Amino acid sequence: MKNILIIADGILAKNFLERLFNSKNNALHNYTVITYNEETIPSWDVNFENFIFYNFDPTSLGKLKLHLKSEFEQAMVIMQNEFDIKCVCENLRQIYPNLDMDVLDLWGMGRYFSGDNHISIIDARKILSSRFMDFLPDVPVIADNIGMGVGEIMEVQVPNGSSYAYRHVGNIRKKRWKIAMIYRKGSYTIATADDLIMPNDTLLIVGEPRILESVFRAIKKEPGQFPNPFGNNIYLELDMKFMSKNEIDLLIDDTIELHNRLNNKKLFIKVINPTLCSNFSRIKELKSNKIFIDIDYFSTKISINKSKMNELDIGLVITNSKVFNHYKRGFEALKVPILKIGKNGFKILKKGVILGDKTDAESNSSVIMDCCKQLDFSIDFYHFDTKIDNDSKKVIEHFKSLSKIFNKKVNIINDDINPLLKLRNSDDILQFLSFSNKILDNKFGAIFSKDINRLYYILDDNYQLFIPQNDKI
């Protein structure tokens, strides 16, 4: 058992003693409590054998020496007067040169004790202001007094409409962060892969502070924000030497159409190998306060630079099939959605289709629903299997729940016929795929695969949105 000295005065000290008396662990150590007056001691009867109480002025060095005959491992100074705290700490230091002290600070007293390594300042102003910040909407609740206190432990409530609602913990990509606990209706559970996150749940998440800030924003993000959380702007790069006139015209038409219909902020168009033609004149005329044109007279090849994409806050890159297949490894490294356009114009599209596996479908569901909601597309989810197992039921349940959030119906199509064969002649679809390493395989190796993502090239003439495997969703 340790000997602990408590010097207390004021309403805050009284509240602390009340909590100490009610604590189940108060019998583990011996406590000596010194107060100015008896009012600081809680009113109910306390008869703990390990508590000793004194009532005198602790700012008097002589009185402290008279009463304090024992050695103490720790002292706690909780008083309501700044001058009294300074006097008490100086007196204790004379009596006990190496005593560890925890001192309440309401006035910014750190400057007085900066040279004393045995004094820990408890800054009440900082703690209270931080606690008040916790009650503001859409502000992350960070554990200040646990661990390092730098934001590696965070609490976040899942709002109605969040992309994390109705998702299974195991289908959320978690790189350098974890969901530790789920609090729901006054109870808690340790998070497992099968747990379903519901609206108004509170999640206890741990990980790198910078990553947790991004996760917090993703959880709090309202529907209808795509291309956010990947970024706020759209990017198009045109190679006037590598692309034909018709290809450039179609890319411009589709990009402007998406810029007008999605909730992005800016559109960046870069032109390399410029040539004097009608395309070039049209591109220059597009310049406005929301459309930025960069004509590069020196570069000869399309540049896929991740740091540049981050600098421009790019959330969606648009390209065509020829460029995508030529630079797809570079596109995959960007970790932002890539829209590969089809051949007949974006305006004729009417629905989004999901053909990927069950894990991909749930992981990408928030992006798919958000995108289709903004574009006013219907959604078809092809379940390429006559047998519906538990995992399939979970995914179907998940999409049905999201359809309520986004007010967008999802058509579940169960069929044993390969949907790629059914859809290859459809001109009005936007296919959603997970941009994984499977996409990077060459066609020869993919021919013998049954994985629908690896066979993406079968719908190469259609519009396809490749969604990165990213912690932001």
Image (cartoon, helix red, strand yellow):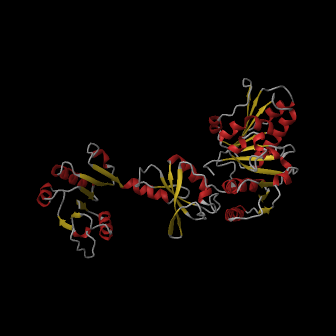
Q: Count the marks: how many? A: 0
Q: Position of residue 262 (x, y in %)?
A: 74, 49
Residue at the image point whose x is 66% and y is 34% from the top: 305
Left or right, residue 217 beside residue 332 = left
Q: Residue 50: which quarter of the image?
A: bottom left
Residue at the image point whose x is 70% and y is 39% from the top: 331
Residue at the image point whose x is 66% and y is 49% from the top: 228
Task: Decide which of 99, 459 is in the foreground and name it.
Answer: 459
Look at the picture and state if 457 lies above or below 137: above
Left or right, residue 97 beside residue 273 = left
Residue at the image point whose x is 79% and y is 62% from the top: 414
Q: Residue 304: which quarter of the image?
A: top right
Q: Residue 374: which quarter of the image?
A: bottom right
Q: Position of residue 470 (x, y in %)?
A: 63, 47
Look at the picture and state if 301 lies above or below 33: above
Q: Position of residue 129 (x, y in %)?
A: 43, 55
Left or right, residue 112 beside residue 242 = left
Quadrant the N terminus occupies: bottom left
Look at the picture and state if 288 lies above or below 52: above
Left or right, residue 239 beside residue 37 = right
Identify the residue at the far front of this view.
448
Identify the residue at the far bottom of this view.
45
Identify the residue at the far top of this view.
298
Q: Position of residue 34 (x, y in %)?
A: 21, 63
Task: Decide which of 369, 10 is in the foreground and name it.
Answer: 369
